[in-house]
Image (tube, grey):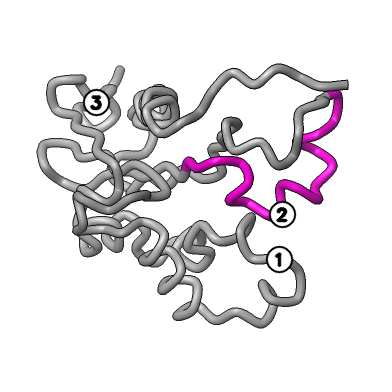
Amino acid sequence: MMTAMEAPIPAEQLTIVPANEASWDDLAAIFGTTDSGRCQCQRFKVVGWIWRDSTQEERTAMLRAQTACGDPNAAATSGLVAYVDDEPAGWVAVEPRTAYPKLRTSRVPWTGRYQDKDDDEIWAVTCFVVRKRYRGRGLTYPLARATIDFARERGAGRSRPTR
């Protein structure tokens, strides 16, 4: 039997906004002190030895700049923030695949694919973070669905494979 805490989050309680429309404090509350809090969604952005030499503070500053939190008029942002009853609950990182240099050199996303690695119309989702009290309640599903419209509104296309 499900308890109230385990029940899926009702759609009417959920709001998902681009990160630049959320506050930095809200995003920081989602990241908290979890493992993802250490990465700050920079694992696929910062390459090789630079990653090993980067500090928590540097990665946090990079995420803050990439999200443009608190600036609804920002030209770009790097993800979406989910709220449950106005409480910050989850995050998803989504940008053009070209924004993630480590994806370019990783074998996994390219196996069996023939797309141009420099095609800005192909987007990638690289990270989900859900606050502990909202885990196991289906929050990643609406976050994932929201990335589709978000990316398409910002130029994601249906690039055709090249051989």
Instruction: Name the residue type under label 1.
Output: Val
* Image spot of residue 157 (x, y percent): 54, 23
Instruction: Name the residue type under label 2.
Output: Lys
- For the question of whether residue 138 can be seen, the reply is no
Name the image quarter holding residue 53. Answer: bottom right
Could you say whether the residue bearing mark 3 is in a helix, strand or loop?
Answer: loop
Name the image quarter holding residue 18. Answer: top left
Q: Nearer the viewer, residue 95 or 56?
A: 95
For the C terminus, give its image quadrant: top right
Is 97 included in the stretch rendered in magenta?
Answer: yes
Give the alpha-carbon distance from disc 1 to disc 3, as whole Å.
37 Å
Residue holding disc 1: 47
| First reached walking from the N terminus: tag 1 or tag 3 | 3
Give the alpha-carbon distance from disc 2 to disc 3, as whole Å.
34 Å
- The numbered disc on residue 5 is none
- Name the residue at 63% across, 46% down: 98
Could you say whether the residue bearing mark 2 is in a helix, strand or loop?
Answer: helix
Is 151 included in the stretch rendered in magenta?
Answer: no
| Image: magenta residue range | 94-112
Q: Closer to us: mark 1 or mark 3?
A: 1
Residue holding disc 2: 102
Residue holding disc 3: 9
* Image spot of residue 48 (x, y percent): 76, 69
